[in-house]
Image (spheres, rainbow, N blue to C red):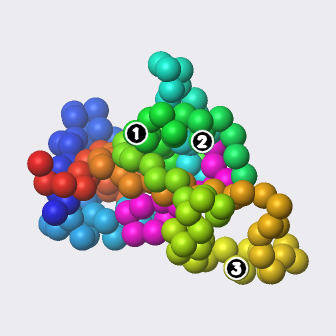
């Protein structure tokens, strides 16, 4: 069972919230937070995935599709897959563009930590096809004039299963809210 914890507003943020007429949102249930979080992730398209091997971190900007609290990424390749062979633990961030000079607290973003699973069209076709279906890419492919992915290439899908994350969206009254998959 997931759980949430909301960080109390520090005095400088209390002042900014009050000055801008923002009321702090207090989530009564995990489901209420998850609904708000999913609204944010559905409005964005790119996450920055961080992987690590041999003490060398790597961060890659990737397009994603949310599926529940998980994230799915279709990829042609790259060094991230070599890293994931050795270390399935990942972190990622998603941030909406904003201009701090216009409004310092207009940021929206998430920082997350979790585990990645890789589904290969060649090696794990059943899991790949299921994840591909969850991504709902058919309309995008149709616009591109494609009926299917080219057969010559071994596409892979990364499924990121967050263990914990932190989400903030001050203009909507959400200061840092921490979510944890298992209520430990």
Distance Cα–Cα, label 2 vs label 1: 12 Å
Q: Is residue 67 left or right of residue 83?
A: left
Q: Position of residue 150 (x, y in %)?
A: 82, 67
Callout 2 crowding tier (Cα within 10 Å): few <14, some 14–19, many ≥20: some
**Pointer 3: what residue?**
138
Secondary structure category for the residue under label 2: helix
Which of disc 1 and disc 2 is earlier in sequence? 2
- Image mark for residue 132: none
**Pointer 1: what residue?**
89
Highlighted magenta segment, given as a residue range = 61-75
* Residue furthest out toward the right: 145
Distance Cα–Cα, label 3 vs label 2: 25 Å
Residue in the picture at 51% in, 40% down:
84
> Viewer-proximal residue, 13 or 78?
78
Q: Position of residue 59 (x, y in %)?
A: 58, 34
Secondary structure category for the residue under label 3: helix
Which of disc 2 and disc 3 is earlier in sequence? 2
- In this rendering, the answer to whether 10 lies above or below 123 is above
Secondary structure category for the residue under label 1: strand
**Pointer 2: what residue?**
81
Callout 1 crowding tier (Cα within 10 Å): few <14, some 14–19, many ≥20: some
């Amino acid at each position: 069972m997931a759980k949430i914890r909301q960080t109390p507003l520090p005095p400088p943020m209390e002042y900014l919230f009050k000055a801008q007429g923002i009321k702090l949102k207090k989530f009564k249930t995990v489901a209420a937070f998850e609904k708000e979080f999913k609204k944010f992730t559905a409005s964005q398209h790119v996450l920055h995935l961080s992987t690590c091997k041999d003490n060398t971190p790597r961060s890659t900007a990737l397009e994603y599709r949310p599926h529940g609290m998980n994230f799915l990424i279709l990829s042609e390749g790259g060094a991230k897959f070599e890293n994931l062979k050795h270390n399935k633990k990942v972190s990622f961030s998603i941030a909406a563009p904003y201009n701090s000079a216009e409004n310092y607290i207009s940021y929206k973003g998430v920082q997350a930590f979790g585990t990645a699973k890789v589904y290969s069209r060649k090696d794990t076709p059943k899991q790949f096809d299921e994840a591909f279906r969850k991504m709902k890419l058919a309309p995008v492919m149709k616009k591109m004039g494609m009926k299917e992915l080219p057969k010559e290439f071994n596409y892979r899908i990364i499924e990121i299963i967050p263990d914990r994350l932190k989400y903030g969206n001050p203009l909507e009254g959400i200061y840092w809210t921490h979510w944890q998959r298992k209520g430990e």
